Amino acid sequence: MITVLFVCVHNAGRSQLAAGVAESVGDGRLRVASAGTDPEDHVSDVVIGSLAEIGVDWTDHTPTRLTREAVQAADVVVALKPGLDLPRVDGVRYETWPLPDPAGWDVDGIRPLREHLRERIESLASTSTPAP
């Protein structure tokens, strides 16, 4: 099992959506976390609704601040916005998946982003192994 940390700025949209999708498709291959460099107060209602459509209850999740400890606990850190200031930790693999910010989107608009994430995460889960 690998640990994946999804990171964006506010941990209210992209990274929460990615974490929820990862929990739905990980099939026990992934341990999932998310964080933001400047977290908001709550997860986007549209993200919660979009995840509910695929059977994921995300109502109890709240945005969290990115910490060095969170990065150290991960095998893979996925930045969902280029240029984020991420702590660098030896042995952790870093990837950047540039995604649009879904702030202000409705559920219909976010579905294609959710499905794109599903494909990326399924690929990640099938090709990754834990760090030594």
Image (tube, helix red, strand yellow):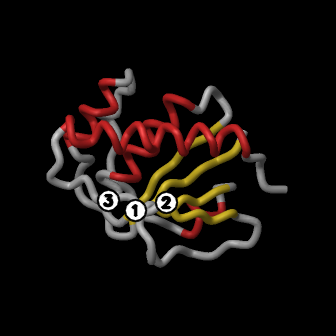
* Residue 8 numbered mark, or none: 1
Residue at 24 percent across and 32 percent down: it is 49
- Whether residues under marks 3 and 2 lie with C-beta atoms below 8 angstroms apart, the answer is no
- Residue under circle 2? 97
What amino acid type is highlighted by mark number 3? Answer: Pro
Q: Nearer the viewer, mark 2 or mark 1?
A: 2
Which quarter of the figure has residue 50?
top left
Percent x, y for residue 131?
Answer: 78, 55
- Residue under circle 3? 100
Which image quarter is the C terminus in? bottom right
Residue at 70 percent across and 64 percent down: it is 92
CA–CA distance between discs 3 and 2?
10 Å
CA–CA distance between discs 2 and 1?
10 Å
Q: Can you say whether 107 is above or below 93 in the image?
A: above
Percent x, y for residue 47?
Answer: 28, 41
Percent x, y for residue 108?
Answer: 20, 35
* Residue 101 numbered mark, or none: none
| Left or right, residue 57 beside residue 85 | left
